Image (cartoon, coloured by chain):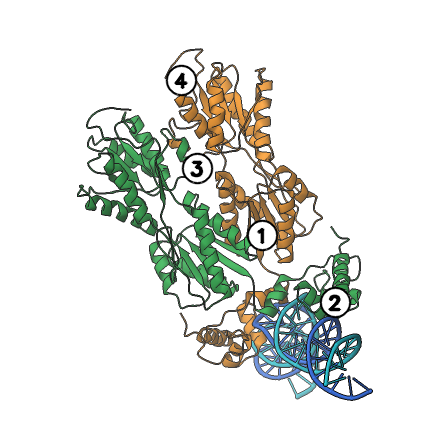
Chain colours: A green, B orange, C blue, D cyan
Amino acid sequence: MTENGSRRATGRYGAPVMVDVAALAGVSYQTVSRVINDQPGVRATTRERVLAAMRELGYRPSTVARSLASGRTRTIGVVAIGSALYGPATTLRGVETAIRDAGYSVSTESLSRFDRTSALTSVERMTTAGVEGIVAIDPEVDAAAALRALPPGVPMMVLCGGLDAVAAGIEIDGNEGSQGAVRHLLDLGHPTVRHLAGPLRWEAARSRMEGWRTALEAAGAPVDEPLQGDWSARSGYAAGRVLAADPDVSAVFAANDQMAIGLLLALHEAGRAVPGDVSVIGFDDIPEAAYLIPPLTTLRQDLVDEGRRAVAMLLSQVEHPTTEPVPVRMVPDLIVRASTGRYTPGGIRK
Amino acid sequence: MTENGSRRATGRYGAPVMVDVAALAGVSYQTVSRVINDQPGVRATTRERVLAAMRELGYRPSTVARSLASGRTRTIGVVAIGSALYGPATTLRGVETAIRDAGYSVSTESLSRFDRTSALTSVERMTTAGVEGIVAIDPEVDAAAALRALPPGVPMMVLCGGLDAVAAGIEIDGNEGSQGAVRHLLDLGHPTVRHLAGPLRWEAARSRMEGWRTALEAAGAPVDEPLQGDWSARSGYAAGRVLAADPDVSAVFAANDQMAIGLLLALHEAGRAVPGDVSVIGFDDIPEAAYLIPPLTTLRQDLVDEGRRAVAMLLSQVEHPTTEPVPVRMVPDLIVRASTGRYTPGGIRK
DNA sequence: GGCGCAAGTGTGAGCGCTCACACATCGCCG
DNA sequence: CGGCGATGTGTGAGCGCTCACACTTGCGCC
């Protein structure tokens, strides 16, 4: 650390300001400004002198003043559903890291409920706070629609873990991924696959359900009524009890891994072996998925990378408002583990 | 939405500014300022007129300008270890929500590694960005020490999920919680308890290990060498294979639930029943803990509440710099589920 | 050797707001 | 009925910086 301004400081709030540095270095404040901003046209010796003065005074340029004068805040707002769920939390992490790595700061808004109203309020607040771009992570369907309908102000990226972004963007195709999962089960000989859906106010839940339905229909397999969960293991367990009671059920596709966990326990308690009697498939590939009993077959999506890409697209819009974003499409990978197996009618088989 | 400034706007960046509102309302800019800040001494009719003008112009006060002029940013910086781990993520959520609820904005910094260097860098950056307080979530031990050693600048709260805060604060007593867990196992007749520790560069891992050791010593039970994990299910699995091979192992206390998950699988694969042959206890009570096979006995800590309290303490320091923080101590609750049972020497018992 | 040009440096103004005042206006008392 | 306080309102200055320009120098050139 420096000796922290033992000299007089002109700043109203105690800290040394630009003129203090300028005075000590024997230059004008403008030269100090140029040094701070790495602008050319400063003699090397002068620059050195200014740097030394800054160090001696423990000077730090005021981000706030700089923002006001330049009109740029170098801040990106992130509005996210504030849940303990793996998906949103992971995406958030990717997004935040990417923003910081690009040299911007992050202003976060964690919503307990990401509906229309809170979405609009948050965006409003971030806008008046001067953010240069906004990333929305996993809004509910109506919120996503409302955000897309907003008059174009600051560039925005809506990540709904299922579909697109405002004005083209990242699409994690849960639909296509789900189709692959269902086909995998069908290929193993299962007559059909049951679905445990997430809350349908999320696009992700919808597209996964759609994918499941599409694959079933394409194969001419019967489409039973999907069950409804809330992403939690608890709801998966509840659904599992229902499913376990039905001897015809031989394969279940859960919309996320947490629900699959609950499913696994319910099946186990009912004495139905996985994958001997029932095959289970999840979605997300949470880090624990490989260590469940049995290790879970699931769909992996690279959420951190999704966040990174979204930020890259957003920033290119922020910095070159002319560039049109190029849509990106990411399809989750099927990770086959031990929770899925061949269909064995009425039999038990490991 | 408003008709968004159909009138001329004076602002350099296109948006209407205070003088525009003042002009339209036929008052001075100072009166507008008073209205914005809900200050008394404005006639009700005048206030109404100003409000109407603001609405008509679609005026939003510039947060940046306001910060510069007032010297207050109403922003709290949050530095957190950016992991997918349940603990940090949950605390972060509690902290962010509490800050926002108090009317402050949040500036987040998600660190892939929360060591000394990155801690110092982040604090430095946040300080120059003008935050009025800082919350650090789960720094490594040396980082926590470095933060505490910092010269008093902005108020800071260090949450290390095991111990305290700068200048007194929240203490989640992992030590005492762990002792309870070990005693529970000892009371069930187990001759001793093995420990699967987290990375010891975290205070939380250390205090949990200390609690385990203390309880064992107090009971005169043998203290075997603890195993070392990295919080992940993968590392729990690896440790589990080692433990499963030792027929003397009858009880294991894992420093978090994720590692316990890996443990459970390894034990299962080795044919050692839980809790018949081996009892397992975790830490955190992740939402899935109750739905594992078997449902996991674990220690629950209210991390969201911890975050909330920490923020409350921080803000009271921010707003009344004189008030001394009153230390708070939270002890995790033992949640007994099906993964722990009576000690049965050499026997198998459900 | 006076000119143009680059490199280096300084000056004025202003970003959009809040602070600390000064200034009007009114009712009401002695 | 002059003066006092309360109430409402306006003025000047300045937060700490960046912008756009104006100004110096030194150097090579015809």
Categorize mark 1 by other alpha carbons within 10 Å: few (<14), some (14-19), many (20+): many
Q: Tell me the chain of label 4.
A: B
The residue mark sitting in front, 2 or 4, is: 2
Q: Which mark is residue A287?
A: 3
Question: Looking at the image, do the residues carrying marks 1 and 2 touch, with CB atoms under 8 Å apart?
Answer: no
Q: Secondary structure at mark 3?
A: loop
Mark 1 and mark 4: Cα distance apart in space: 48 Å
Question: Looking at the image, do the residues carrying marks 1 and 4 touch, with CB atoms under 8 Å apart?
Answer: no
The foreground one among A99 and A146 is A99
The foreground one among D8 and A242 is A242
Using the rendered view, name the quadrant where residue B276 is placed: top left
Vertical placement of A257 versus B122: above or below?
above
The residue mark sitting in front, 3 or 1, is: 3
The answer to whether any part of residue A222 appears in the image is: yes
Q: Are marks 4 and 3 on the same chain?
A: no
The residue where tag 1 is placed is B77
The residue mark sitting in front, 2 or 3, is: 2
Question: Looking at the image, do the residues carrying marks 3 and 1 touch, with CB atoms under 8 Å apart?
Answer: no
Of the image marks 2 and 3, the number of the one nearer the N terminus? 2
Q: Secondary structure at mark 4?
A: loop
Q: Tell me the chain of label 1.
A: B
Q: Which mark is residue A43?
A: 2
Mark 3 and mark 1: Cα distance apart in space: 29 Å
The answer to whether any part of residue B104 appears in the image is: no
Image coords of residue B346 (percent x, y): 43, 11
Q: Tell me the chain of label 2.
A: A
Mark 2 and mark 4: Cα distance apart in space: 78 Å
